[in-house]
Image (cartoon, grey):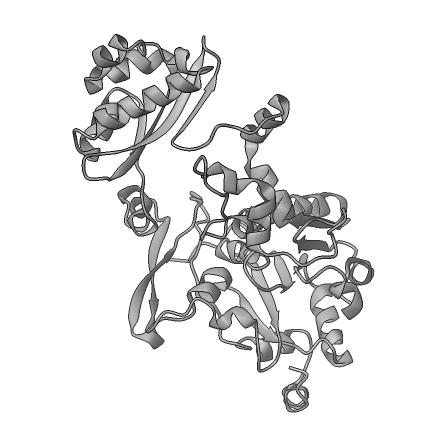
Amino acid sequence: MTQSTGPLDGIKVVACSTAQAGTVPYMLMADLGADIVKIELPEVGDNSRTSGQVDGYPSSYFETNNRGVKSLTLNLKDPRGKEILYKLVAQADVFGQNFRPGAAEKNGFDYASLKKINPKLVYASISGYGPDGPNAPLPGTDAMGQALGGVAEAYSTPGKPLRTGIVSIADESCAILTFGGILAAVISAQKTGKGQKVETSLLGAQVRMMGWTLTTTMWRDKNPVTGQARINGTAQRPAMSASFEDRDGKPFVFQLKGRYWRNAMTALGFYEELETIGLGDLGVVVDSNDKRDELLSTLDACFARGHRDHWVEILRETDIVAAPINTLLEASNDPDVLANGYVTEIEYPEFGKTAKVHGSPWKFSETPAQIGVAPKLGEHTDALLAEVGYSTAEIEILRAEKVI
């Protein structure tokens, strides 16, 4: 039986990208069958190859962000190295880089230069702050993106300082938006024969991820109420999303609209108690901080009488969205996560083990994703150079002279 190819089979990418936001777009494309060539420094490689080390495993950071790609070592400061890059670009659909603004121009792989070589090229450029604005020349990191984009407020606790989180939200969201932008530009290039530059940023990704909550904040011209619950809408049409803890301190969340309030609270056995203190209608808390606080403290006490699984089951049976709040480890073992292949397992023979890794967030009925492993440094150098016309003898000279 012939193995099916991915939906991006035939798409060729050359990426001079490092870190997370700059590599994940191409890892996702590799999962879906694209041919990704990752350019790395000879003998050194992407400095993230040693990040996220766990005893007995490969680098969790490099493996997660670079699986399925090909590694070619190239010294781009040498004219011969630059010539090789240009030959690869001439055959590529996409070129990607996330260097500090100005570095691509300085080193001869900016959009204007590569466009002359391949007019159909889609050129993806990722920065910290975006191409315009007072801080455009500055380097960016995930923490910077989180700090400026508003995500710290999303999970903040009233009365406590805003803090960035441990998960690379800015990097990952920027990578996914870059992935989408690249595909849109590739489709355009296929239709028109004309490539273009696609620019994304860590900051821009965070602003987009704030979604309708940011729109509401701007229209109201004041910050949202944060903490345990999100209560919004009007007194006539309220809605609520809130988290609580059970008797053992295990957290869970539920979300509903006001018209389901009575049914949900009745099923839980709380409605009469709430009605007695004037909280039989969720709408009364929308414009009253005191009522909001009273509602939350009352529900805290109610839910502390039982177990999380019991409460979640009741709410789901009442057709209310509810779920336990997972830790990262719990999320990796969640039955729906596993059943859908969002986390899967892959063999690492050289480490003598099978390990859990990210699966694919997509399911294609005809062209399923294929999960690979990250390449060894320079693993594909000889084969790739042969493809663009270099002989074995020429490759040996380039290696001896540290061009590759």
**In the figure, residue 64 lies in which quadrant?**
bottom left
Task: Locate residue 258, reporting x and y percent.
Answer: 38, 14
Q: Is residue 343 left or right of residue 204?
A: left
**Could you tell me which residue is drawn at 36 percent across and 11 percent down?**
259
Task: Locate residue 185, reporting x and y percent.
Answer: 68, 46
Q: Nearer the viewer, residue 38 or 280?
A: 280
**Could you tell me which residue is drawn at 33 percent across and 67 percent down?**
347
Q: Is residue 289 left or right of residue 11?
A: left
**Could you tell me which residue is drawn at 40 percent across and 71 percent down?**
58
- Image label count: 0
Q: Nearer the viewer, residue 389 or 269?
A: 269
Q: Is residue 78 left or right of residue 217?
A: right
Quadrant position of the N terminus in the picture: bottom left
Residue 386 seen: yes
**Could you tell me which residue is drawn at 23 percent across and 26 percent down?**
301
Residue 180 seen: no
Judge whether 146 appears above or below 154 on screen. Answer: below
